[in-house]
Amino acid sequence: ETRRGRVARQAVVALRWAKVGLVMKGVGKALYVVEAKEIDAPAGQAPIYWRLLTTHAIQTQQQAQQLIYWYSLRWNIEQVFRLLKQKGLQVELLDLETGKALVQLTLLALFAASKIMLLHLASKQKEAVPLAESFTRQEVACLQALQKRYEGKTAKQRNPYPQDSLQWCYWIIARLGGWKPHEKQAGVITLLRGWNYFQHILHGWTLAQKFVS
């Protein structure tokens, strides 16, 4: 969690769970608590300590680990909402006559957000993440043309990723969003800015290809 000054690391945690009961105004509720506490945290770093309450029945280590995994995804979910809100796609500002229209536009926004998250998550992986069918041939061809413009002469200014990887696309989209290779990894808003710019370029590039052909 770099936003809190915490360096990314692998951690060994002690995992415990138990069934508990909460009572409020005479009404009881059965819940399960799962606790994950880091063992031997690095010097100068606060140990990871999560204590989670859930209505899911936790009776085995596998179930406790599953809950911890779900909780670890919370930052990705927050990033998706950040993309949809005011600093991103501004879904909350939509002024439409029907709920159906709002749902349709929100789904389109989620599609764009999923592309951004795909690139963002790929950028954090050490191994190359295959492109698969995440980008069309036309999009890849356009990115290839753009790479020549945004690469520099030195090794640090060149795209270091294999061309058939999502990281390769991330690097170019991030550059379109204003990111520079000497900076830390591009955030989702920078990637969204680059993605929007890329869509405009792609539209013009597609028209030019048709005209030339």
Image (cartoon, rainbow, N blue to C red):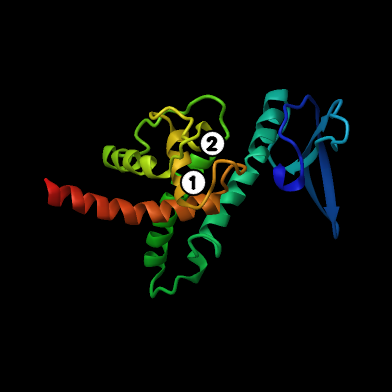
Q: Quadrant of residue 138?
A: top left
Check the image and report above or below for 122 versus 40. below
Question: Looking at numbered disc 1 in the image, what kind of residue is underneath it?
Answer: Ala
Q: Which mark is residue 78?
A: none
Tell me if residue 7 comes above or below residue 61 in the rendering. Answer: below
Q: Quadrant of residue 144?
A: top left
Q: Camera-side residue: 87 or 78? A: 87
Using the image as rendered, state which of residue 59 and residue 176 is in the foreground. Answer: 176
Q: Are marks 1 and 2 in contact (CB under 8 Å)?
A: yes
Q: Classify 83 as above or below 62.
A: below
Q: Which residue: 50% across, 49% down?
A: 191
The residue positioned farthest toward the front in the image shown:
153
Q: Nearer the viewer, mark 1 or mark 2?
A: 1
Residue 169 lies, in percent from the top left, at 42, 38
At mark 2, the secondary structure is: loop
Q: Where in the figure is residue 13, as x and y percent of width and height?
A: 79, 27
List the residue tagged with mark 2.
123
Answer yes or no: is residue 120 visible. yes
Point out which mark residue 174 bears.
1
Tell me which residue sits at (51%, 35%) in the image: 122
